[in-house]
Each structure stands twice: as structure tokens, then as C-alpha cells.
């Protein structure tokens, strides 16, 4: 392989080609046509619906990538018409369907699908999914028409609803902007809504087939589906004038920068130990040491993880899975004895029952599980000197649906992943839009207790909704990846900076990201999956520099940062006695112009241009230069800027 990685590898960690969406237009109505579905449906330049998709999922909630054929697209001044055939299949089953999409200049859009199971087809969902965006919608009124014809007034949830905020749906009408109403009619099945912010999706999702019905379910051979979604725009708004320039202004102090931690899996201990000289330069505050006796973890596993923590100068935290349902107290007591025999105490101990690592959908029976109060009392007895944490080792969704008795805890914890439902680049960066609501709801759950988040990453370290995450041997973008390629690219660095910033401003007491090595790591190590360019050259991933820089800010004064387009650029500002530091991340694939409202400053960049240099230069972002453009900064695709104001 060439010593110069392709631009795609530098940005995304993969050379997988991505087809650009086609923009369909009919007067003021526009929609992006992508992989057979519609995204970013706008009227007069205003987003009215985030997506309308006909999806086919397997028994583990994995989404098929359909094979599309016979595609035809016809556009005129008055409208557009799209038709295609599609086949969703694997080596065991297949579902074939026909799609028709029509849009007109009067603001009407129709998406109609008919399909048939070619043989018995096991699925968790086959049918339409509609996404409402968050901006201008969260907490706003909505008119609901139920399947029985009853019309009621409601609201989209402000705080994140743990279950379904709306059920038995036939249509929803909301105001996208003052004077612009959108009616969404859903036919062919009974629809209900879930608050997708639970999984860090930036949307409310309305979908077919109520979750209270059995799942997975089987579509019999020859069984057909006939569904239609119809949008009608009521009223209108003038197209909004866009401003390509993004404004950034630094405000007052609003707290301190929380400590940054990193996750550690016992499977990565050996390689992390071999790379400790490089990893030590990150200087994480804490290292979350994972313990799962079902995987054979024991005293040696914990001792080895503690040794890595000692080498890094990090505080070891214990993340312990409790397997037994009936004799959990004895299991926790034995674990306490094991830990007591180690050289280093765990000052923070997090515990969770194994049963809670899997999702229990609304309406489904909860599996046998130790009661929270008894579990936490047993943990308190086994670790009397430790700070006791609990909550969920899975995702915020599970914490929101099964809230612990926080008065028995010192700390409430949870994790997230950026790719539970979608694996494309835009959905990944859009997941950061949901984090303020997660932070607010987590604070409500924790009440008077602090909350921590992580170890979180782009990929999934475990799958609460199926057997396991996807192993991804082809190094592609897909939902539910374990080893996601973007962890190794500029996009991964931008996402991690945005994630830390969102939760720092959201009041998290500690934030843990990814891992040291392995699929969530910050530098290359040999692996059974491909890591193009790095497998030949080795070195640090761009995210290494983000974690190194953010870890160094621990305890600094956190200052408010106002960014005019936070969906495109996110950042964090912190003040120390020496200087004010600002970190900015471009969350888009296009170059962004940033107007930075400050005096003289110096700047260091992490971007595709210095990717190779960054892979072997740990202090790259310590090498500042005077800003050559005064108060205007150009950020290339997924670039990072570290700014220092004296």
C-alpha cells in the first residue's frame, strides 16, 4: 500500500464508496433521495421531516441494505416521480418490494410501497419509519389522529420519554416553523412513536407494528404488505437566507472541565501494556476496568488492568457485571475479597446485573434480575471504602426505562453509541444533537447525585438489542458496528470532541471515551479486522490528540461558548491561569468558515493535510502558530482547531 493514505481513509478510515444523494425538487419542496429512501425533506428551505424510509430488519434489529433495480426518476417543474424495485435478503430469507414516490410543487409528497415475502421471513420490523427532526419540534404542540379517528392535542416530548409518547397513530400534524404546518398521514398498519433521543438519534421516530405485539415475527411465504406515507404542507414560509459564516463567541465561566476517562477491556490489556509509553501521554484521569465472569475474567484480569492504570497514572474504576440472580450477594462478596487482595483499591466501583445488559422493550416482561436495593446494599458491604456507582452498562435507553434508586448510590452511570439505528456519516454526527436532552434527562434521573457517562464510542462494545455487534470484516459503514472504521479517521476525532463538549456543558461529573487499543482505541494495534494504511504504517489515530488535549483541561474553568450553527461546528472553551483555550470541530464534510470573536490568538490544526504527521507526533497540537487570517478560521472536512488566547 502507498505510504500516502487516500483522502477517504484520512477522513473516514475506509475507502468504501458512498453514493451522493440526489436532490429531488418540486417548487419549494425538496428531498434527498438516498438508497431508496428520502431524507431532509424541506419546504421553502425549512426542514419539515428528517426522513421517510421503508426498512426491512432482521431478528437482531439489523437493517438490510436492499438491492435496488429498475430505478427510474422523472422530474419536471411541477413535480417528480420515482419508481424502483428492491430486494432485501441474506442467505436464509428474502423480501421483495416495489416503491413509488411522488412530489408536487403544492407541497404534497407520497411514498407508497408494496412487498411480498418470497419465503417465510423472520423480522423485527418491515415497513415504514418516519423521522421528525428536533429543531423547532422538541416540546412543541402536535395534532394527533388515532387509528379510531379520534383527534387529540399533544406535544412532542421535551425531556426524553422512556417509552412511546404517542401510540395508535394514523396522522400527525405539527408546525415546522410559524405559518408552516405539515400533516403526515400513515396508512397500511398501526403506527406508534418512540423518542429516538434515547439512542442518541436526533429525531422522533414513528414506525409500523406496535412493540407490544410479539417480536420477532414471521411474514409467511407469499404474505404481502401495502403501506403509504403522505405529506401535505399547509401554509408556507419564505426561503431563509443562509449565512455561510459560523460565529463563535466565548462567554462567562459556568463550571469546570470534567475529568476524562478511557475504557479498558481485558482483551486489550496486552497490547495496551506494550504501547504504554505512547498511551501515557494521554494522561487520562481514570481507567474503567471491565470485569465479566461470563468471559472468564478473574483476579489476574483485574490485576493486569490495574497495572495498566498504574503505568498511565490513571485512577482505576471497576465496572463489574454481576451474573447470579439468586446468589448475587455471595458473588459480590467474593468479588470484594478478590479486589481486597489486589495492590490497588478501586476508588470507584460500578455494578450492574447481567440481565440489564439486554434491552427489555416496552410491554415485554422483565427478565429475572436482582432487585436494585439488595444489589446496591451488597455492593456497599463488599466495597465499604469505594464510591458506589450504578445505572446501566448498556445505553441511556435502558437507564431511562429502568431507573435505579439513586439514594443508594454515590454516582449514576450509563454509556451511549452513535450507531444503534444508522451507520452513515451524517447520522453519526447528528447524534451529537441529542446529547443536551440526554444530559438534562440524566440529571433528572440522578437527582442530587452526580452522573458520569462512558466508556462511550462511535461503535458498539455490546449489543443490547441482539446477539452481538457486527464484526465488520469488510471495513464498511453500517449500524451496530463493533469495529467501526471512522474511529481511525478525522470524523472520529471530530465526533469525540463534540461528544465531550456536549456532556461537559451538560453537567457530567466525568466522561469516559472509547479505549486504549482495539476497536475503540486511540492508536493502532494488530487486530483480526482490517485497518487500512495503519496495518502497514502503525501509529496514532487522530482521536489520540483529542483525548490528550481534553484530559489536560481537567479542572480548568469551563466557559460558555455560543456557536451560531452548532450542527456544523461544536466546541469547548476553558480558561487556565496561562491562557484561554478553545477547541473547535467541524462536523461536516465541507469546509466551514468560522468567525471567532476574540483578540489575538494562536492556533494548531488537526486535519486531513497533517494526518500522516499526526500518526507519529503525539504533541502535534502543542505546536501553535499565529493565526494568519485574524478572526476568520477555515476548518476543512472534519478538522479540529485548538486555539489559545493569551
Image (cartoon, rainbow, N blue to C red):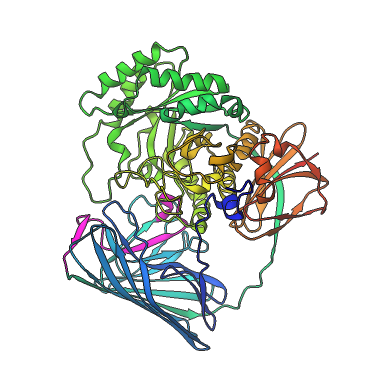
Residue 456 magenta: no
Residue located 61% across and 42% down the image: 542
> At 58% from the left edge and 37% from the top edge, which residue is drawn?
538
Against 393, residue 204 (above or below) is below
Instruction: Count the marks.
Output: 0
The reply, left or right, for residue 284 in relation to residue 150 is right
- Give residue 625's quadrant in the image: top right
**On screen, residue 125 above or below 573:** below
Q: Nearer the viewer, residue 161 or 55?
A: 55
Q: Is residue 202 magenta?
A: yes
Q: In x, y percent, where is residue 559? A: 67, 42
Name the quadrant of the C terminus: top right
**Does residue 27 sit above or below 128 in this rendering?**
below
Identify the residue at image location x=50%, y=44%: 531
Residue 541, percent from left and from top: 58, 41
Q: Is residue 551 left or right of residue 78?
A: right
Whether residue 259 is visible? yes
- Say which residue appears at 35% left-offset and 33% top-offset: 405
Q: Visible in this render: residue 502?
A: no
What is the quadrant of residue 189 in the picture? Answer: bottom left
| Location of residue 223 in the rendering, given as x and y in whole percent from the top left corner | 18, 70
When the figure is inspected, residue 369 is found, relative to residue 42, above or below; the finding is: above
In the image, the segment drawn in magenta is: 196-221
In the displayed structure image, the side of residue 175 where residue 255 appears, left or right: right
Amino acid at each position: 500500500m502507498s505510504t500516502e493514505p487516500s483522502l477517504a481513509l484520512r477522513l473516514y478510515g475506509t475507502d468504501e464508496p458512498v453514493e451522493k444523494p440526489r436532490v429531488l425538487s418540486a417548487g419549494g419542496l425538496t428531498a434527498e433521495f438516498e438508497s431508496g429512501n428520502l431524507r431532509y425533506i424541506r419546504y421553502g428551505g425549512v426542514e419539515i421531516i428528517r426522513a421517510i424510509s421503508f426498512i426491512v430488519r432482521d431478528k437482531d434489529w439489523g437493517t438490510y441494505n436492499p438491492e435496488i433495480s429498475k430505478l427510474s426518476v422523472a422530474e419536471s417543474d411541477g413535480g417528480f416521480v420515482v419508481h424502483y424495485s428492491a430486494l432485501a435478503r441474506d442467505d436464509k430469507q428474502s423480501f421483495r418490494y416495489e416503491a413509488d414516490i411522488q412530489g408536487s410543487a403544492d407541497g404534497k409528497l407520497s411514498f407508497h410501497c408494496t412487498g411480498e415475502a418470497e419465503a417465510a421471513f423472520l423480522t423485527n420490523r418491515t415497513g415504514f419509519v418516519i423521522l421528525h427532526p428536533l429543531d423547532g419540534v422538541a416540546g412543541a404542540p402536535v395534532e394527533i389522529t388515532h387509528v379510531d379517528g379520534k383527534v387529540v392535542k399533544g406535544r412532542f416530548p421535551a425531556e426524553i420519554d422512556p417509552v412511546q409518547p404517542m401510540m395508535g397513530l394514523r396522522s400527525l400534524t405539527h408546525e415546522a416553523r410559524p405559518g408552516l404546518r405539515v400533516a403526515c398521514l400513515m396508512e397500511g398498519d398501526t403506527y406508534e412513536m418512540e423518542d429516538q433521543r434515547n439512542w442518541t438519534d436526533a429525531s422522533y421516530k414513528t414506525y409500523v407494528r406496535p412493540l407490544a405485539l410479539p417480536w420477532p415475527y414471521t411474514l409467511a411465504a407469499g404474505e404481502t404488505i401495502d403501506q403509504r406515507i403522505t405529506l401535505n404542507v399547509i401554509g408556507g414560509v419564505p426561503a431563509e437566507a443562509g449565512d455561510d459564516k459560523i460565529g463563535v463567541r466565548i462567554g462567562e465561566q459556568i463550571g469546570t472541565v470534567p475529568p476524562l476517562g478511557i475504557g479498558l477491556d481485558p482483551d486489550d490489556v496486552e497490547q495496551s501494556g506494550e504501547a504504554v509509553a505512547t498511551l501515557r501521554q494521554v494522561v487520562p484521569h481514570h481507567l474503567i476496568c471491565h470485569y465479566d465472569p461470563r468471559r472468564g475474567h478473574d483476579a489476574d484480569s483485574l490485576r493486569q488492568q490495574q497495572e495498566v492504570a498504574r503505568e498511565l497514572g490513571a485512577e482505576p474504576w471497576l465496572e463489574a457485571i454481576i451474573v447470579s440472580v439468586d446468589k448475587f450477594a455471595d458473588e459480590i462478596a467474593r468479588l470484594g475479597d478478590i479486589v481486597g487482595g489486589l495492590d490497588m483499591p478501586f476508588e470507584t466501583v460500578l455494578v450492574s446485573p447481567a440481565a440489564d445488559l439486554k434491552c427489555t422493550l416496552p410491554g415485554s416482561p422483565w427478565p429475572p434480575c436482582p432487585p436494585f436495593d439488595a444489589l446496591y446494599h451488597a455492593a456497599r458491604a463488599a466495597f465499604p471504602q469505594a464510591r458506589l456507582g450504578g445505572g446501566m452498562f448498556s445505553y441511556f435507553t435502558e437507564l431511562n426505562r429502568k431507573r435505579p434508586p439513586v439514594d443508594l448510590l454515590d454516582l449514576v452511570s450509563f454509556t451511549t453509541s452513535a450507531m444503534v439505528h444508522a451507520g452513515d456519516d451524517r447520522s453519526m454526527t447528528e447524534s451529537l444533537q441529542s446529547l443536551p436532552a440526554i444530559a438534562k434527562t440524566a440529571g433528572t434521573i440522578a437527582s442530587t447525585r452526580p452522573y458520569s457517562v462512558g466508556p462511550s464510542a462511535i461503535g458498539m462494545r455490546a449489543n443490547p438489542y441482539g446477539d452481538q455487534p457486527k464484526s465488520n470484516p469488510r471495513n464498511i459503514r453500517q449500524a451496530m458496528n463493533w469495529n467501526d472504521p471512522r474511529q481511525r479517521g478525522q470524523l472520529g476525532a471530530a465526533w469525540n470532541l463534540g461528544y465531550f463538549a456536549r456532556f461537559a456543558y451538560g453537567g457530567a461529573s466525568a466522561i469516559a471515551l472509547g479505549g486504549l487499543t482495539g476497536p475503540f482505541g486511540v492508536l493502532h494495534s494488530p487486530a483480526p479486522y482490517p485497518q487500512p494504511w495503519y496495518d502497514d504504517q502503525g501509529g496514532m489515530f487522530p482521536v489520540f490528540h483529542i483525548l490528550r488535549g481534553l484530559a489536560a483541561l481537567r479542572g480548568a474553568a469551563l466557559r460558555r461558548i455560543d456557536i451560531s450553527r452548532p450542527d456544523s461546528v461544536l466546541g469547548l472553551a476553558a480558561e487556565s491561569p496561562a491562557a484561554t483555550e478553545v477547541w473547535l470541530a467541524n462536523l461536516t464534510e465541507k469546509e466551514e468558515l468560522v468567525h471567532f470573536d476574540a483578540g489575538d490568538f494562536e492556533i494548531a490544526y488537526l486535519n486531513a493535510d497533517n494526518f500522516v504527521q499526526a500518526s507519529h507526533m503525539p504533541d502535534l497540537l502543542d505546536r501553535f502558530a499565529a493565526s494568519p487570517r485574524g478572526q476568520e478560521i477555515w476548518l476543512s472536512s472534519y478538522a479540529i482547531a485548538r486555539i489559545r488566547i493569551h
